[in-house]
Image: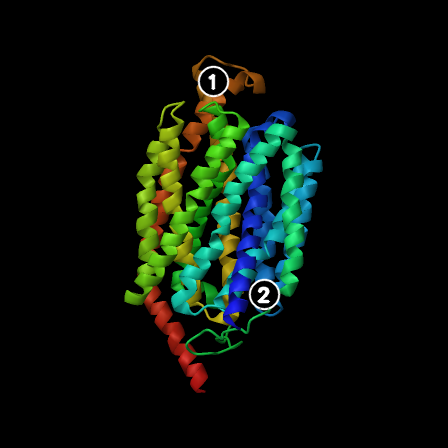
Amino acid sequence: MTQNDKTKMLVVLVAINTINFFDRQVLGAVAEPIRKEFGLSDVQLGWLGTAFTLLYAMVGLPLGRMTDRLNRVRILGIGLFVWSALTATSGLARNFWQLFAMRLGVGVGEAACAPAATSLIGDCFPAHQRAKALSVFMLGLPLGIALSYAISGSVAHAYGWRAAFYVAGIPGILLAVATWFLREPGRGTTETHAIGQQQRPGSPYWLVLSTPTMIWLVLSGVLHNFNMYAIGSFLAPYLMRFHETDIRTAGNISMAVYGLSGIPGLLLGGFLGDALMKRRADGRMLLGGVAILIAVPLTFFALRIPAGDLLGFALLMGTGCGVMYVYYSAVYPTIHDVIEPSLRGTAVALYFLAMYVIGASFGPVGTGFLSDYFTKQAASAAGIIEFTPKLLEPFRAEGLRSAMMIIPVLVAATSAVLFAGSRTVAKDREKLQRWMQESVAK
């Protein structure tokens, strides 16, 4: 591929990833008006966030194998069209179950994005450039989230929450057309030892999971995604309940705290990750572990900020979320470092299966469950006996605040897992390079 082809590929993939996270975050941006219109508990609100992840993870596994065998660009384009159309039709839902079904469908389409896109980037950029390239690709995450909060919150404020879904679906449908003009790169052509479609003997799934570093990466993904989806689902509701903002203000603050803060985190993480990788094989994982560790006190004290101090909350939580984004710059390139090109789609799909089924699925639902529990505890302490939605409403702010304290605890656990994983990277990377060298020699 020419440099122009690579640049065009990366630009389009960033745009697709931006739409990817824009569409999945719409629900979090307009969660409060949906909860009130349908009369939902926080557990039910959490289930709407989890609906997306259920089929996303399950369908991702066969799609990951398809990306290792078929045209990745075509798979990506079809998936983009499907999830964008279903995002738009989510605005037609008239009850909880209809919206739940629509979000399931969005997950099916979006499952094509990560395995196909990261595999394409791996075959466009050599190992010493991948952290920067994948960091640029992952800019779609904070950009998509930021735009979703800002646009969806403003649209919902002016026209209602349904209009936010209609607006979200349009760009993806148009962008799906652009994928047909992308050129599919050859597999393995950027490796030091060009092995093409060759694969180590054995089951592809066992080969991935028998790599020790991958086990640590999977475990870190479970913990990290629990936190990120808990924040994504309940940040705007937290601002509206505890800090008493309106939906537009909550959207704008969430845009900065959970969205825009990720841009410097990803860019700095990509630059430092590639620089450290040249010095030591475990450099990226150590960087991720340190960054996540820094986020522990930041997220803890952000949630201890008293009601009304929006600036203090935004600075602490925004900085905490920003350093948490370094995770992606550390982990995604590491998968490419320890897995051969012909298995990377499968590896990403397995990683995402665990990350979403266990992590992202339990993040919204688990936090919602804890929120309902602490809400009832607060109501009971105030002498409330009958737990009706109307009587519980005044206690939902403190209930959600208590529930979100689980986030800094699991952030600390994520950091510990990344440090543990850094101890196996060098050996796994050396083993893969030795096999590729021997394969080319034969």
Q: Could you tell me residue 321's position as x and y percent?
A: 40, 42
Q: Determine the secondary structure under disc 1.
A: helix
Instruction: Kindly identify the residue that appears in the image at 33 percent across and 37 percent down.
Output: 298
Q: Could you tell me residue 300's position as x and y percent?
A: 34, 35
**Going by the image, does 298 lie left or right of 348?**
left
**Going by the image, does 138 lie left or right of 33?**
left
Q: Could you tell me residue 327's position as x and y percent?
A: 39, 52
**Residue at mark 2:** 67
Q: Neighbour class for label 1 at 10 Å: few (<14), some, many (≥20)?
A: many
Of residues 357 and 101, the one nearer the viewer is 101
Q: Residue furthest bottom?
A: 442
State which mark lies toward you, 1 or 2: 2
Instruction: State whether residue 39 is above or below residue 4.
Output: above
Q: Neighbour class for label 2 at 10 Å: few (<14), some, many (≥20)?
A: many
Quadrant hosting residue 45: top right
Instruction: State whether residue 442 is above or below residue 34.
Output: below
Quadrant hosting residue 39: top right
Q: Could you tell me residue 366's position as x and y percent?
A: 49, 37
User: Disc 1 marks which amino acid?
Assistant: Ala
Of residues 395 and 308, the one nearer the viewer is 308
Q: Determine the secondary structure under disc 2.
A: helix
Q: Which mark sits nearer the N-terminus, 1 or 2?
A: 2
Instruction: Kindly identify the residue that appears in the image at 30 percent across and 50 percent down.
Output: 290
The numbered disc on residue 379 is 1
